[in-house]
Amino acid sequence: MHAYRTHTCGEIRETQIGQTIRLSGWCHRIRDHGGVLFIDLRDHYGLTQCVVDPDSPAFKLAETFRAEWVVRLDGEVRRRPEGTDNADMATGKIEIYVRDAQVLGMAGELPLPVFGDQDYPEETRLKYRFLDLRRERIHNNIMLRGKVVDAMRERMKASGFNEFQTPILTASSPEGARDFLVPSRIHPGKFYALPQAPQQYKQLLMMAGFDRYFQIAPCFRDEDPRADRLPGEFYQLDLEMSFITQEDVFETMEPIITGIFEQFGHGWPVTKKWPRIPYAEALRKYGSDKPDLRNAIVMQEVSDHFRGSGFKIFARLLEAPKNQVWAIPAPGGGQRTFADRMNSWAQGEGQPGLGYILFFDRARDETSLKENPNASGVGGRGPLANNIGPERVEAIRVQLGLNAGDSAFFVAGDPEKFARFAGAARTKVGEDLNLIDKERFELAWIVDFPMFEWNEDEKKVDFAHNPFSMPQGGLEALNGADPLTLKAFQYDIACNGFEIASGGIRNHRPEAMVKAFEIAGYGEETVIERFGGMYRAFQYGAPPHGGMAAGVDRIIMLLAGEQNLREVALFPMNQRAEDILMGAPAPATPKQLRELHLRVNLPEKG
């Protein structure tokens, strides 16, 4: 017999009844039922119920067992007594009658329990991550991660992509965040950088003629903590293709990503044909460039209904050409208490409040019937309704398609400044009124991103997103159009309110690349200095190419039904970018600093 096990804890079935077997694993739960010990033994593969009664030679030792002790148990497989089957366990029809036992590893007092799924402080969970990973939910998330990554690889290879690994030690590149720098011992005073993304390398692979590349790429960014990104490092499904248009990327990747969600998405509905939503339209309708399309609320501009109206606040705002009034429809939200809650929420977000109109049925409203016993139709209540009059109220209701029992909320001013808040209000309304179908995956392409934007701090035109994207209209547009009107061949994938991928068709013509950087205030010498390898490659026959990168962590988080990326990563850092399990970052020793020709210059303690 094997020294530790003849079977795993998840594989024993009725076909093994009567066999003598050996199991090893962790004591998941121990119960004493009238002197008979029931031990749920756990390993990677599952749970098996083991029974030790006082007649067993192993009973005295088994009485000392505690939670998470690692033990070996020998015994006979038998049918559970009638009425005690456990349908929630794959091994729920059998149990092991234990005759011999051995302690393989004792466990001290646990800083957090493995049995159950209680909430524990994040610091405790990360410090003892090896225990946290034993918990069923987290363990399953990590196994899901492995399966999803395998499926990504299979689907990419089936679509003609080849997997390559690009360098980790590379040169610093302005990708939009700070680099992690690695000092060179061999070259004093010089530094490598960890890649923020394999962007330049994958484009160079297209220059080299490999046609279709992908990898599950680690990416490193030294940026402040964000709720939607793991601090320090994350993984992406990175890919690039040659001789393609934007449409080719969509046709290739849409079925791959759809297939992943269908394969691992609990059978939930997945968008079959993804909509293509221009960036400006996404902000206009949803207040976000990563809209949650499970929420059916679509915001609309209603400025004309307030121009010259009795609601002076909005009427005066609309005298400025840039200003608008947007409405957020709220089906089923026609209660004053709901309007008050939304107002309080808006004030908590730093806003003065939210204007609203509550729509009601005049024929059922006591106040309306007192004024007119024959009252009919839909009326509106609230400060806005009282000031703009019934005709404008009715025009707003008809435009928004609302009925009695519904409401609408309003934001006004410069849309560039309030769009994000309006989007958050849309989400809040959808959540509070249960208008969001949580058990589905709604995917969309967000397209036509602006190529450039105005940098108010530096008073200059700057790249809005990826500087390597091809502007729509190419070099001719760069030479002749207002830069702030240019759109880029750049696209994102949005799913359930998250950006899960971003990409673009690349600017592969050296003269167009130089011109784009000139518009953003960089000369040709800067392009050569910062992107010399790629710029040189463009001089020797550059194919039209493009690609994208999908966030592996975010996709798995959505598939696992989690709200935090840490729940799907093996050993994540905390929000201060510290690995409290391994103690990183840590000071370097004097010897290490000498070898690297470095001296630490710490900030003064204030």
Image (spheres, grey):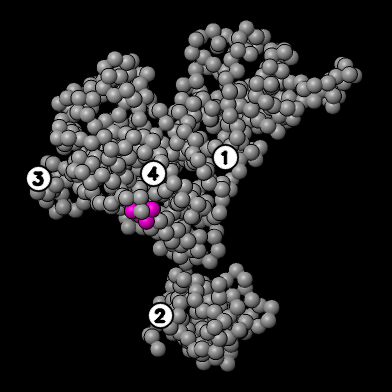
Contact, mark 4 vs mark 3 (Cβ under 8 Å): no
CA–CA distance between discs 1 and 4?
A: 24 Å
Contact, mark 1 vs mark 4 (Cβ under 8 Å): no
CA–CA distance between discs 2 and 4?
A: 52 Å
Disc 4 versus disc 3: nearer the observer: 4
CA–CA distance between discs 1 and 3?
A: 54 Å
Residue 104, disc? 2
The structure residue drawn at horizontal position 57% and vertical position 35%, both measured from the top left corner, is 427
550 on left or right of 391: left
Disc 1 versus disc 3: nearer the observer: 1
- Amino acid under disc 2: Leu
Which quarter of the image is occupied by the N terminus? Answer: bottom left
Contact, mark 2 vs mark 4 (Cβ under 8 Å): no
Magenta region includes residue 155: yes
Q: Which one is earlier in the sequence, the residue at label 1 or at label 2?
A: 2
Residue found at the very far right of the displayed protein: 373
284 on left or right of 215: right
CA–CA distance between discs 4 and 3?
A: 44 Å
Q: Secondary structure at mark 2?
A: strand
Q: Which one is earlier in the sequence, the residue at label 4 or at label 3?
A: 3
Residue position marked by numbered label 3 in the rendering: 187
The segment highlighted magenta reads 153-157
Q: Assess disc 1: are there few (<14), some (14-19) or many (≥20) residues with their C-alpha within 10 Å of its C-alpha.
A: some
Where is residue 219 drawn, in percent x and y?
31, 46
Q: Secondary structure at mark 3?
A: loop
- Along the line of sight, which residue is nearer the eye, 278 or 412? 278
Magenta span main SS: helix
